[in-house]
Structure formats: structure tokens, C-alpha cells
Image (spheres, rainbow, N blue to C red):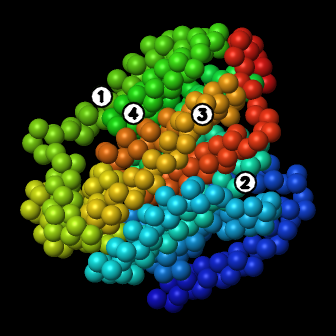
Amino acid sequence: MSSHKGYRSLKFGVLFLALLAIFPLGLLLRSTPALRKPFWIVFGALPFFAAAIPMFDIGLLSWSGYWIGFVYGLQVTIIDLLAAAVLFTLPRGRLPMWCKLPFLLYIFAAALSLLQADEPVAASFGLLQFVRIFFVMVVVARASADPDVPFLILKGMAIGMAAHFVAVLYQRFQLQLPQTMGLFIHQNTLGMAAHFVLFPHLALLLAGYRHVRYLVGMVVATIVVVVFTASRATVGFSVIGLGTLFVTQALAGLTQRKMAVGFAALASLLIVAPLAISTFSNRFELNPLGESQYDERAAFNRAASLILDDFPLGVGINHYVHMARDFGYSERAGVIGFEGNRNNIVHNAYWLTAAEAGYPGVIAFCIMLIVPMFVAWWTGWRSRGTLEGNLLLGFGVTLLIAYLHSFYEWVIFIKEIQYLLAMTMGMVFGIALRLKAPGTNARQAVPTKVMPINAV
């Protein structure tokens, strides 16, 4: 007990010091422009190291071991503190309300669900997480008025994915794991995170961005990571995303660069296909699917549907397991009675939202997701002759695939993925606003020739 109290005191001490450091760090960033580049690179990389960094999140109140949901307590993370610090360095101005309103609409719906919750404190854990994610989105959107910031954040994401690539190789070939999770705690989290790296970098490669070796290396490494997750949804939706991005870029206008990358991709598929087949064979040999006898995803969906039927306004966010397990919905839906199954969350982000926040919540959730995706596609297509326009198309594919993937997973609610989602949404809004501003000089794409393979 004394060690537990000591640990809590340490956490609060660290939080107090971190809060005190916000303003001085902001002043340092503002007075030292040279620090902004490494700052944004680190900022983009941090979500990939969240599970491996001690004290990454500081729990103000923790129900770990007591409550099961997508968040276990009131938390503040390093990313939140850094976002607060960098806010002092941003030029004056506000993000237009139309960028913020969809997210605020969902936060309002989530707040209303607290009125339905058996444990309002547990529901407030989820509400606070969305408020923090919204704050990060706003900060990134405002910061992206600087045209270098999105590229620096993406470079940070690339560094994070490179670390996972090394971990995945070790797990697959040294530890002989059939499914690799990198530095995350589950392969599904890694699979979802890969979408946020793969498609923007491929879009930049197709558009003629000059750092060819960096882009090619990152695209190849991320594809290898995707394959070694041995997740059917991750691999399947990644292939759909690659096809969608290539078709979109072809419609925007074929170039030598795009055709060269396309042929290289086909050759790579022939090389990667045996690796993918071997990876899935190893997984299914050790863990047969058995879905003809029991489809767990379908059972979870039925449980969520039964909850929604009885509670059209929801049962409170972060409450699915509590309701499904303790009030008989999992049993009625046919979920196997093992503790691990009954303590699991429905593998569908939309059914999870509907069960917890009701019809108002799932409608608001979909609006929150659709608006930035529409902005990315619309503005990206209209500015497809610019590098930023092509990057927006890559973000559009990223969001589309993440949303489709969420029909089979709930991990979009995990904080690491939510940070990546918030950063992507923020970059979309920031770039779109800059491209729409009068007198903007956007970076031109390279439409006419293939850059040399040794370009730096």
C-alpha cells in the first residue's frame, strides 16, 4: 500500500512539474525558432512510442483493474502538455468554427450520454479523452498554417513507424511470433496506425516530392509492417487504400513518376505475396479461425444492437463492457462465456458508439469523421497540381481506410490512434485553409518527369 501511495505521489509530482514547464517551454520555442523543427518531429513520433515510454500518461484518477473500457482513468499525456506549450508560439488567430463544430457536436453528444451512465465517473474518462484529442487537433490545425509543419509531423510519424519496423522484424524472426504488434500492445493497433503513415507518404512519392529514398524506404517498411501483423482487415484495407490512391492519382494525371511507382508496386506485390501467404499460414496454423462454429465479431455486434434497442440514447460512453457483461446482453447475443470474451469490446467502432452514446452519438460521430475527409478530398482534388493538394488526397485515403477498417475494429478509440487521427484532421484543416487563402503560394508537384532515384 505504501509503495502504491508513493507511486501516486510521484505521478502527481511529475504532473506538477510538467504543468510548471508548459509556459517556459512555450517561451523557449517562441524565442528559438531552430527548436521548432525537432519539436514537431518529436510531436509526430510520440504516439508510436506511447506504450513504451514510462510516465507517457499521468493518471489523475485510475480505475485500472476495476473498470474495463477504452480508457481507464482521467489522464494527461506528454502530447497534451506539448500541445499546450506550443500554443504560446502560434500566431494570433482562430480556427474557423466549421472546422471545430463537428468535433464539438460529438463531444456534446458524449457529454449527454453521461446522464444515462451507471458510472458517470467512468463515462467522464472517455469524455475527457475526446476533449484532449480535440485540443490537439485544433493546435495542429493552427500550426499547419506554417507549410513546413505537416511535413515535419509526417517525418516524426515515419521515425515512429521505423522503430516499429525494427521491433516487428525482431518479433517475427527472433521471437517467431505469428502476429507482431511492434511497440504497441496489440497487432490491431499497429495495423490501424500504419494507415496514417503509408498513404500520405505514398501520395508524396507519387506527386514528385524530392526526398525519394526516404519516401520509398518508408512505404516499403510500412508495407512489411502491415503484412507481419497478419491481420486480415489491416492487409485487406491497406490493399484497398493502395488501389484507391493509385486510381485517384491516375485520374489526376499520369506522369512518368506515377507510372514508375506503379510498376514498382506491382513488382513489389509479387515479392511480398509469398511472405504474406507464409505469415497468414503461420498464424492460422497456430490459431485456427473456427468462424464456421463461432463468429465472435457478429456476437459482439448483436450485443451492441440489443443495448441500442433498449437504450436509444445510449448507456454512457466507456460503458459497453459493463452493460454487455453485467446486464446479460453478451449472454443473449451468444458471446462465449469465457472471461476474456465477456470482457472484450465490440469490434466495430460504430456499434460501440451507438451502444454507448445512442443514435445522437453515432450520428455526431459520423459527422465528426466525414467532414475532414470531405475537406481532404475536395480541396485536394481542386489543388491536385500542388504538392499540398496531393498530400490532402493521401490524407483523404488515410481517413477513408481508417473509417472502413473501424467497421471491424474499435481501436480508433485508443489514445494512440486518436492522436494520429487528430493530427491528421488538424493537418487537413490547416493545409486546406492555407490553400484557400488569397495569395497563397502552394508548393508545386513535379508532374512531368521522374526524379533520379538518388535524389535527396
Instruction: Please give the residue where the numbered disc 2 appears in the rendered image.
Output: 143
Residue type, mark 4 in image: Phe
> In the image, is 248 to the left or to the right of 453?
left
Q: Earlier in the sequence, mark 4 or mark 3?
A: 4
Q: Earlier in the sequence, mark 1 or mark 3?
A: 1
Residue type, mark 1 in image: Ser
Instruction: Please give the residue where the numbered disc 4 appears in the rendered image.
Output: 237
Q: Earlier in the sequence, mark 4 or mark 1?
A: 4
Residue found 69% across the figure and 16% down from its top = 447
- Image spot of residue 8 (x, y percent): 55, 83
Mark closer to the observer (4, 2): 2
Measure how far apart labels 1 and 2 are at the Cα level: 45 Å
Q: Quadrant of residue 199?
A: top right
Provide the secondary structure element on which disc 3 rests.
Answer: helix
| Disc 4 and disc 2 in contact, CB within 8 angstroms | no
* Closest to the observer, 336 or 105: 105
Residue reaching furthest right?
A: 31
Provide the secondary structure element on which disc 4 rests.
Answer: helix
Instruction: Please give the residue where the numbered disc 3 appears in the rendered image.
Output: 380
Q: Quadrant of residue 303?
A: bottom left
Residue found 45% across the figure and 30% down from its top = 241
* Closest to the observer, 173 or 363: 363
Measure how far apart labels 1 and 3 are at the Cα level: 40 Å
Q: Residues within 10 Å of mark 2 (few under 14, many from 20)?
A: many
Residue type, mark 3 in image: Gly
Q: Earlier in the sequence, mark 1 or mark 2?
A: 2
* Closest to the observer, 268 or 380: 380
Q: Residues within 10 Å of mark 3 (few under 14, many from 20)?
A: many
